[in-house]
Amino acid sequence: MNSIVCLKQVPDTEALIRVKSDGSEVVLDNVKFIINPYDEFGIEEALLQKEKSGSGSVTLVCLGPQRCVESIRTGLAMGADKAVHLDDSAFEGSDALSTAKSLAAQIKSMEYDIIFCGRQAIDDDQAQVGVALAEYLNLPHAALVTKVEVADDKKSITVNRQIVGGEEIIEMPVPCVITAQKGLNEPRYASLPGIMKAKKKELKPVKVADIGLDANEVGATGSKTISLNYSSPPARTAAKIIGGESPEEKAKNLAKALREEAKAI
């Protein structure tokens, strides 16, 4: 199976994110970046499908600044064969739709059976790139996938996907787009030999002109959404322990605190 995995670099889940005093943007100086965790499920599944079929390749496609190379190399160290990096200042400020358009312009010239994306990126939580990518490429799509089975003839796949209150099983022809959900697999760690091999694997830089798009079609200029303001969440207040000699008295004191202090009732 030939797979493409769309990879996004995001701030570490443990990073302290700060906002500029005027609310104009998020401060990313000295922030550690990682592969979007949901994208790791996509990488692992692509590798598993390649191993099961005994042939094919796994190609990473990433849109982002030069710092993304570190995350791309990590994906290559996990076992991906090669990578394409959409690295151009024109891509800066892309929203989900603009990102999907750029990825589609690159991917349409590539060979693949399945395109894997994470269900969402943990920085903006929009969960739109995968479905928009499928639309741009005119491909079938399944979201929140927790299981993938490829048919013996490799012409179709069956996926299990989460839905409210249960699970849905879908059969789709290939090529197709899948967005990976937690539970699909357990992503492997990059081994030392894998890290050494990753340094020699192909990482192709791509500019806007290389994918046949105009700079006005991508990035902030080509985006349909605009971020007007950023703000940090309110600071958490200290917890209060409700006392009392008996359960009844504690319940009474709790109700009083909720009514008089929290103004919740």
Image (cartoon, helix red, strand yellow):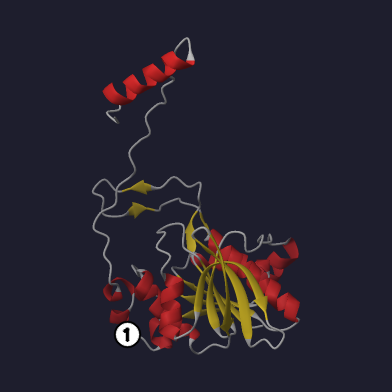
Q: Which residue lies furthest to the top in this view?
A: 245
Classify residue 227 by image quadrant: bottom left
Residue 80 in view here: no
Query: Residue at position x 47%, y 63% from top?
Result: 120
Residue kind at label 1, given as amino acid type: Asp
Query: Residue at position x 30%, y 71% from top?
Result: 220
Left or right: residue 52 compared with residue 251: right
Instruction: Specify the quadrant that holds the C terminus.
Output: top left
Left or right: residue 124 compared with residue 20: right
- Where residue 144 appears, as percent x and y from the top left, is 52, 65
Q: Is mark 1 on a helix, strand or loop?
A: loop
Q: Which of 158 and 215 is in front in this view?
A: 158
Q: Nearer the viewer, residue 220 or 38?
A: 38
Classify residue 132 by image quadrant: bottom left
Left or right: residue 261 compared with residue 75: left
Q: Nearer the viewer, residue 233 or 216?
A: 233
How packed mark 1 is, by other alpha carbons closer than 10 Å (few <14, some 14-19, many 20 or more), is few
Number of marks in picture: 1
Residue 42 in view here: yes
- Where residue 88 appears, as percent x and y from the top left, is 40, 75
Position of residue 6 relative to residue 229, above or below, is below
- Where residue 108 appears, as percent x and y from the top left, is 48, 88
Instruction: Specify the quadrant that holds the N terminus.
Output: bottom right
- Where residue 142 appears, as percent x and y from the top left, is 51, 73
Query: Residue at position x 42%, y 86% from top?
Result: 211
Left or right: residue 232 compared with residue 13: left
Question: Which residue is denoted by mark 1 in the rendering?
Answer: 214
Query: Residue at position x 49%, y 59% from top?
Result: 164
Position of residue 107 relative to residue 255, above or below, is below
Q: Nearer the viewer, residue 33 or 109?
A: 109
